[in-house]
C-alpha cells in the first residue's frame, strides 16, 4: 500500500506496502526518513553520542506504565476503515487499535497475533488457523469467531466481477497459481478454520495475505452485504468512529482525530496480548503497552518536525538523509539507523494515455530518461550517501538480487541519452540545436513530487536540470501525499470515454488507454514499493502484471510472460529453482525498465533520550534484521520500547 513519505522502516502491511503482511508489495512513500514515525525505530546506533546506554533489551531497565508518546508525522491517513486501507499511513494508525492476525518471526517460524496458531500441511496445500479464545469486538458484537473471518473472506475479499459489491483492494492476493484460482476457506470450529490452496506453496508463511488482513464482525457486515450497500457500511459510525477497536484487539483505543493536525489514542487496559501471549522470545507483553497515550502530531515540513524533536515537543521523528549529520552527537536525541530497508524506489513513469506516449512505446526513451537521472549522483547529493543503487525490483541485500552482470546498467551519460532519445522517437521528433522538439515545439514533461521531503526536492530539481541538458523543458508540481495518491497515482475509466474492458480497482482502473488519473503527469518522484524479500513475486505480480492491483502506471508488454514466471517461482520445489526463476525475471525487468530504478534507502530515526528499551545489536543478515524489526513493530510498544518514568 502506498507508504507515506517515509512511514517507518518495516511496516507489517505491505501493499501499496498492501495486501497483507508478509507477501505483498507495498506502495511506499519515498524512503528518505521524513516520516519514519509510524512505528518504532529498527536498529540502535548511537551515531557518535547521545544514546542512552540502558537502551539494550538485555539490561534490566525498570519500566512502568505511564507517560505520553508523540510521533511526528508528515502524512495523514485516508480514514479509519480497516476495509479501505491503501497506504501505510492509514495502516499504521489502524494498527494501533487492531493487531495483525500473525506474522513471521524468522524465515520459518509463525509469530502469533489474533491467530494462536498457523500450520501449513506437509504438502503445502492446506493451512489450519486457530484464533485465540476471548478476542472481543468493540460495540455489542461479542467475541471474534472463525465465522467472522470466513464471512469477510467469502463475502468481501474473494468476490470478483458482478458479484463484487464492495471493491476491496486486496482481492487479487487471494487468487494464486498459474491459473489465478481462489484460496478456499472453510469454518471447522468456533475458533478454527482451514484454507485450501489451489497449488502447493512452501513459502506461504511469507505470502499469506490473511496474516496482514483485518476483518469486522459478521453480524455488522451481513446487513450491508445483503443490501449491496458499500457506501452505507463505509459511513457507519462503527467504522468512522473506530468503535470496532473498543474491545481488546489492539494496544490502544481511538480517542480523537483533528484532521491535518493530530490523531490521539489511549491505552487499552484490556489488550489481549497481556494474557493470551504474555512473554514470547525477547518480547514481554504482560504490561504492554507502556504508554498511557500515543499521539501522531502532523507537520507540513520535515524541518518543523525535526525542530519539535529537538525541543522535546515530539518523542520520535524520521530523520531525512541530508539532516542525519546534524543529529550525530546530539546529546538530547538518540539516533537509530538501519541499512535493511525492503523498499525499492524509482522514478515513476506514466505509461497511460495521459502521459507522454514514447515513454510507453519505447525502451530507448526510458533509457534516455534513466541516463539523465544518475542514481549514484542522487544517492550522494540527495540522500547523503545513505542508500544503495538498485537496478531491478528487489533490495540489493535481498536473497534474489541478481549479479550485476545480469542487470542493465546506465552510465548517466547525457550524450548517450540524446542518441537514445532520437532513436526511440518517431520522425516527428528531433533536435533543433540543443532543444528536443516534437509536433508542438520543444518537448515539455510534467513532473510531480511529494512535499515535505528535502531529498525528493533535491532529486526533482536535479532531474529538471538534467532534462534541460537533454533539451527537454519540464515543470514540477509539489503535492501532499494524500493528493499525490488521489489525483495522480489513482486512475479511473471515468476520465476517458467508454467502458473499460476490465477494472481491478482504484489504482488500476483498466487498460492503459481506458483509465487515466485525474491530473496529467509524466514522471513522479517520492513513491516506491516495499517488497517481501523471501516472496518477491507477490510485489511483481501486483505492480507489473497488466491486471496487477497496483499497476497504476498502466505498464504492459508482450515480450515476457510475467504471470507465468510468477507462478513458476512461487511454486518451485527448491531454492535453486526459485533463484533461477527470479534471476530471469529480475533481469528482464531491469532490461525493460518500466520505471527508472534508483535506490534502496536506509532508515534513520531520531528519538528523545527519555525513551528506553530499544533493540540493541545489529545483524548482518538482512532478512533476519527485517523480520526482527517487523516483530518489534508488531509488538509496539512493549517492554522493548517504553518511556523512562520521571
Image (tube, helix red, strand yellow):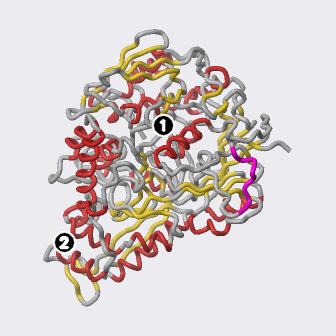
Residue 326 versus residue 147 in the image, above or below: below
- Point out the stretch of residues depicted in magenta: 49-56
Inspect this view and state whether residue 520 appears: no
Residue 519 sits above or below residue 172 on the image: below
Furthest-bottom residue in this view: 433
Q: Sequence-wise, which precedes: disc 2 or disc 1?
A: 1
Q: Tell me if 156 is positioned left or right of 180 in this view.
A: right
Q: Is residue 54 magenta?
A: yes
Residue that carries the numbered disc 2 in the rendered image: 424
Q: On the image, which quarter does residue 17 sit in?
A: top left
The picture quadrant where one finds residue 553 is: bottom left
Give coordinates of residue 400: x percent, y percent: 34, 49
Give x and y (percent) for residue 138: 61, 22
| Quadrant of image for the N terminus | top left
Front residue of 291 and 602? 602
**Disc ID at residue 106:** 1
Q: Please, which residue is most extreme toward the right here?
A: 646
- Say which residue appears at 19% left-offset and 63% top-offset: 361
Left or right of 625, for residue 160: left
Name the mark on residue 444: none
Q: Secondary structure at mark 1?
A: loop
Crowding around mark 1 (Cα neighbors within 10 Å: few <14, some 14 to 19, many 20+) is: some
Between the C-alphas of marks 2 and 1, the distance is 46 Å
> What residue do we see at 45% from left, 48% from top?
2
Amino acid at each position: 500500500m502506498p507508504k507515506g513519505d517515509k512511514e517507518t522502516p518495516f511496516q507489517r502491511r505491505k501493499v501499496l506496502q498492501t495486501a497483507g503482511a508478509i507477501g505483498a508489495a507495498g506502495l511506499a512513500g519515498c524512503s528518505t526518513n521524513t516520516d519514519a514515525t509510524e512505528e518504532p525505530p529498527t536498529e540502535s546506533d548511537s551515531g557518535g553520542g547521545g544514546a542512552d546506554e540502558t537502551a539494550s533489551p538485555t539490561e534490566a531497565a525498570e519500566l512502568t506504565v505511564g507517560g505520553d508518546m508523540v510521533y511526528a508525522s508528515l502524512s495523514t491517513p485516508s480514514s479509519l476503515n480497516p476495509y479501505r486501507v491503501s497506504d501505510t499511513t492509514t495502516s499504521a494508525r489502524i494498527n494501533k487499535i487492531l493487531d495483525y492476525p500473525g506474522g513471521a518471526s524468522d524465515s520459518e517460524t509463525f509469530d502469533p497475533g489474533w491467530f494462536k496458531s498457523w500450520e501449513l500441511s506437509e504438502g503445502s496445500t492446506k493451512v489450519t488457523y486457530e484464533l485465540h479464545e476471548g478476542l472481543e469486538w468493540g460495540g455489542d458484537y461479542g467475541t471474534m469467531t472463525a465465522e467472522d473471518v470466513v464471512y469477510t473472506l467469502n463475502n468481501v475479499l474473494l468476490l470478483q466481477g458482478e458479484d463484487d459489491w464492495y471493491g476491496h483492494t486486496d482481492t487479487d492476493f487471494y487468487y494464486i497459481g498459474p491459473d489465478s484460482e481462489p484460496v478456499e476457506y472453510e469454518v471447522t470450529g468456533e475458533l478454527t478454520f482451514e484454507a485450501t490452496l489451489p497449488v502447493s506453496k512452501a513459502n506461504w508463511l511469507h505470502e499469506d495475505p490473511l496474516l496482514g488482513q483485518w476483518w469486522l464482525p459478521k453480524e455488522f457486515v451481513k446487513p450491508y452485504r445483503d443490501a449491496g450497500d458499500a457506501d452505507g457500511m463505509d459511513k457507519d459510525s462503527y467504522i468512522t468512529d473506530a468503535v470496532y477497536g473498543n474491545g481488546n484487539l489492539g494496544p490502544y483505543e481511538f480517542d480523537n482525530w483533528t484532521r491535518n493536525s493530530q490523531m490521539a489514542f489511549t491505552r487499552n487496559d484490556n489488550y489481549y496480548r497481556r494474557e493470551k501471549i504474555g512473554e514470547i522470545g525477547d518480547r514481554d507483553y504482560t504490561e504492554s503497552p507502556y504508554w498511557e497515550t500515543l499521539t501522531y502530531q502532523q507537520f507540513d515540513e520535515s524541518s518543523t518536525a525535526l525542530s519539535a524533536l529537538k525541543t522535546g515537543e515530539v518523542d520520535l521523528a524520521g530523520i531525512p538523509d541530508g539532516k542525519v549529520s546534524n543529529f550525530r552527537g546530539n546529546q538530547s536525541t538518540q539516533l537509530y539507523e538501519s541499512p535493511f530497508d525492503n523498499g525499492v524506489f524509482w522514478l515513476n513513469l506514466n505509461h497511460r494515455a495521459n502521459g507522454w506516449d514514447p515513454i510507453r512505446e519505447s525502451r530507448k526513451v526510458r533509457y534516455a530518461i534513466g541516463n539523465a537521472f544518475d542514481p549514484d549522483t542522487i544517492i550522494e547529493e540527495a540522500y547523503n550517501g545513505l542508500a544503495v543503487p538498485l537496478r531491478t525490483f528487489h533490495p540489493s541485500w535481498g536473497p534474489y538480487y541478481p549479479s550485476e552482470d545480469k542487470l542493465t546498467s546506465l552510465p548517466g551519460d547525457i550524450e548517450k541519452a540524446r542518441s537514445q532519445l532520437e532513436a526511440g522517437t518517431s520522425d516527428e521528433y528531433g533536435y533543433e540545436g540543443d532543444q528536443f522538439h516534437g509536433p508542438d515545439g520543444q518537448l515539455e514533461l510534467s513532473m510531480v513530487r511529494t512535499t515535505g521531503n528535502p531529498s525528493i526536492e533535491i532529486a526533482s530539481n536535479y532531474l529538471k536540470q538534467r532534462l534541460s541538458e537533454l533539451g527537454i523543458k519540464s515543470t514540477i508540481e509539489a503535492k501532499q501525499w494524500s493528493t499525490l495518491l488521489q489525483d495522480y497515482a489513482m486512475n479511473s475509466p471515468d476520465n476517458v470515454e467508454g467502458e473499460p474492458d476490465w477494472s481491478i480497482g482504484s489504482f488500476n482502473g483498466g487498460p492503459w488507454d481506458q483509465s487515466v488519473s485525474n491530473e496529467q503527469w509524466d514522471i513522479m518522484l517520492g513513491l516506491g514499493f516495499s517488497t517481501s524479500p523471501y516472496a518477491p513475486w507477490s510485489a511483481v505480480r501486483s505492480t507489473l502484471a497488466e491486471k496487477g492491483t497496483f499497476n497504476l502506471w498502466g505498464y504492459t508488454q508482450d515480450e515476457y510472460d510475467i504471470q507465468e514466471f510468477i507462478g513458476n517461482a512461487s511454486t518451485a520445489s527448491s531454492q535453486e529453482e526459485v533463484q533461477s526463476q527470479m534471476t530471469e525475471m529480475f533481469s528482464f525487468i531491469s532490461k525493460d525498465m518500466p520505471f527508472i530504478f534508483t535506490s534502496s534507502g536506509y532508515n534513520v530515526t531520531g528519538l528523545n533520550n527519555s525513551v528506553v528499551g530499544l533493540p540493541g545489536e545489529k545483524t548482518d543478515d538482512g532478512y533476519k534484521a527485517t523480520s526482527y524489526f517487523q516483530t518489534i513493530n508488531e509488538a509496539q510498544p512493549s517492554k522493548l520500547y517504553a518511556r523512562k518514568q520521571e
